[in-house]
Image (cartoon, rainbow, N blue to C red):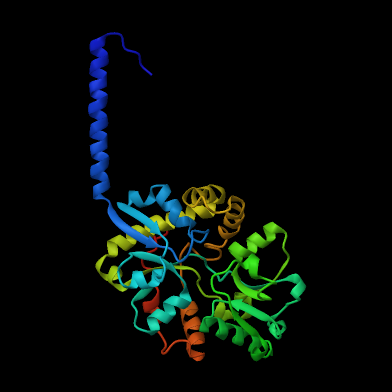
Amino acid sequence: MFFWTGFLSVALVLTACSSGQEGKEQGSSAEAKDLQKVTVMLDWMPNTNHTGLYVAKDKGYYEEQGLAVEIIQPGEGSTADQLVAAGKADFGVSYQEAVTQARATEIPLVSIAAVIQHNTSAFASKSEANIQSPKDYEGKRYGGWGSPVEEAVLKAVMDKAGADFSKVENITLGATDFFASIGRDADFEWIYYGWDGVEAKRRGMDLNLQMLKDLDPALDYYTPVLVTNEKHLTDQKELVEKFMSATAKGYEFAIQNHQEAADILLHNAPELNPELVKASQEWVSQKYQEDAAQWGLQKKEVWERYAKWMHDRELIPQMIESEKAFTNEFLPKKG
C-alpha cells in the first residue's frame, strides 16, 4: 500500500481510481452483455451427477468460452427432456432410456456426453430381507415409480434367474426417501449407488445390492447423460462445442479434485448434507470416466444393445437409429 502526502496527490489518485473503477465496471458490464446466455436444466435436485456443471460455472470455464450459463431445476409437470427437445432449454441432464424412448417417438433429443461411464444403479434391500439375487424377489414388495420400464427390467432379470415375476408385489411409491420407505413400505427398491448407496454405508446400514450392469449386459447403459436438441447440433454447432469444452473441463477437474469439487457443489446447493456430498463425490469422481479414453465418450454398441432390449420388450414402438441418438463430435479433441 502506498501513502501519499499532499491533498492534490490524494485527489488525483482518488480521481484516477474512481475513473479506473468506473471504467472497470463499465467494461465488466459490457463483457457480461457479450456473453451468450445458456440454460442447463437438471433432471432432479442438485447432486454429484451434476458437479462438473457447477465446477465449470464457478471456475469460470463457461465464461472463458463466452457463455453465461444458468443451471436450473425442472418445475412441476415439466422435464428437462421436454424443454430441451422443444428448444426452451439449451442443454439438460437425462438418461439413455429416456433418450431412446424420445427417439423412438420422433422427438429430436440427442445425447452429447455420458456423465458416468457405467450404470451405477442397483436393486437394494436391507440385509435382513435376505435378498441375494433376483430369484429372491419372489414374494417381496418392490417399491418404485410405477413406470413400464421398471416392470420390464424386473421381469427380465427375474426371468433370467428362473424366477416368477408374477410373485412380486409392485408398489408405486413415486419420489420417496429411500431410507424412510425401505423395509417399511417396500422390501427392495431401485437406487443410484453413488447417492443412496453411499449414504447407507455412511449411516452404517448394511444393504444387499444387485447392480444392474451385472444382471444383464444390456442394462449397462449410460445414466445420466447430457442432452440437447437436433436444431442446436445443426444451427448452433459453435455453442455446443463451447459448452462441451467447458463442461468436460469441469468434470475432469472433479475427477482430479473430488474434495474441492464437493465444496463447489455445496456452495451452490447448501441445503445438501455436507458429509453425504463429500462421501458421494469421492466415489462418483472415480466413475465419471472410469475405463473410457476420456470423459463423456459413448459407444454405439451400448446404444444399440439397450434399444434392442427395449424394442424386444415392446417398450418402444420402433427401433431407433443409434447414430442419431448420440454423438461424440462435440467432446474436446484429445492429443
- The spot of residue 197 in percent (x, y) is 64, 64
Q: How many numbered discs?
A: 0
Q: Quick check: 226 left or right of 236?
A: right
- The spot of residue 236 in percent (x, y) is 26, 65
Q: Residue at x 24, y 32 (%)?
A: 22
Q: Residue at x 41, y 71 (%)?
A: 77
Q: Quadrant of the C terminus?
A: bottom left
Please, which residue is most extreme toward the top here? Answer: 6
- The spot of residue 69 in percent (x, y) is 35, 55
Of residues 63 and 71, the one drawn nearer to the viewer in this rendering: 71
Q: Quadrant of residue 240?
A: bottom left
Q: Quadrant of the N terminus?
A: top left
269 versus 310 height, above or below: above
Q: Quadrant of residue 212?
A: bottom right
- The spot of residue 172 in percent (x, y) is 57, 79
152 versus 85 height, above or below: below
Of residues 182 and 193, the one drawn nearer to the viewer in this rendering: 182
Q: Quick check: 97 left or right of 89?
A: right
Of residues 73 and 288, the one drawn nearer to the viewer in this rendering: 73
Q: Residue at x 61, y 64 (%)?
A: 196
Q: Residue at x 71, y 80 (%)?
A: 133
The answer to whether residue 335 is visible is no
The answer to whether residue 134 is visible is yes
52 versus 10 height, above or below: below
153 versus 238 height, above or below: below
